[in-house]
Every structure is written in C-alpha cells, then in structure tokens.
Amino acid sequence: MPRFNSTAIAAAEYNASTRILQIWFVESGGPYSYYGVPAAIFEGLCNSRSKGGYFNDHIRDRYSVG
C-alpha cells in the first residue's frame, strides 16, 4: 500500500479486480472506499505532485463512496 507525504492523503490502496480504491485521509482517517475506479485514476493519484488536488479534481464526487 502506497503511503504519501501529503497534508491531505496518508495512504491509498487499489484492487484492480474489483476496481475499488481505498483512501486514508490525514485528518479524517479511513479507509474510505471508492467504487468503479479505473486503474489509471489510482496511478494518477500515486504520481501526482498534489494528492489532495488530484483527489479533488479526479475522484471526489465522481465515484460512489462506501
């Protein structure tokens, strides 16, 4: 599981077979599960300079949360 040096996101984990992205936030903990997420979105999160910005632009309000 990748851990990030980010003020917003502590870690993320992705299951390619179920397309579930789990995210642990610095302030609110987690995991929060996002369903139907393509692998490219997880890769983009891992490679982004701003994890919080990437989350806001590409994940938040785009995938169902559980």
Image (cartoon, grey):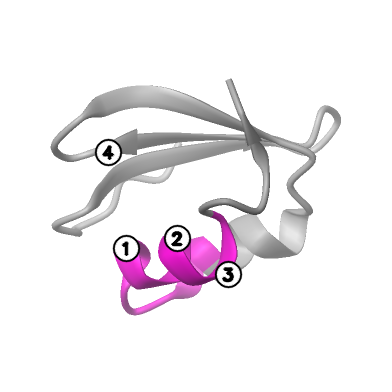
The dot on residue 31 is: none
Residue 21: x and y in percent read 61, 37
Q: Secondary structure at mark 4?
A: strand
Q: Secondary structure at mark 1?
A: helix
Q: Is residue 6 left or right of residue 14?
A: left
Residue 46: x and y in percent read 48, 62
Q: CA distance from mark 4 to mark 1?
A: 9 Å
Q: Above or below — where is 20 with respect to 39?
A: above
Mark toward the start of the polypeptide (4 vs 2): 4
Q: Residues within 10 Å of mark 4 (few under 14, many from 20)?
A: some
Disc 2 designates what residue? 55
Q: Residue at x 82, y 27 (%)?
A: 18
Disc 3 designates what residue? 44
Say whether marks 3 and 1 touch (CB < 8 Å): no
Disc 1 designates what residue? 52
Residue 50: x and y in percent read 31, 74
Q: Residues within 10 Å of mark 2 (few under 14, many from 20)?
A: many
Q: Main secondary structure of the magenta part?
A: helix
Q: Residues within 10 Å of mark 1 (few under 14, many from 20)?
A: some
Q: Hey, what amino acid is under mark 4? A: Phe
Q: Is residue 3 magenta?
A: no
Mark toward the start of the polypeptide (3 vs 2): 3
Q: Residue furthest right?
A: 17
Q: Nearer the viewer, mark 3 or mark 1?
A: 1
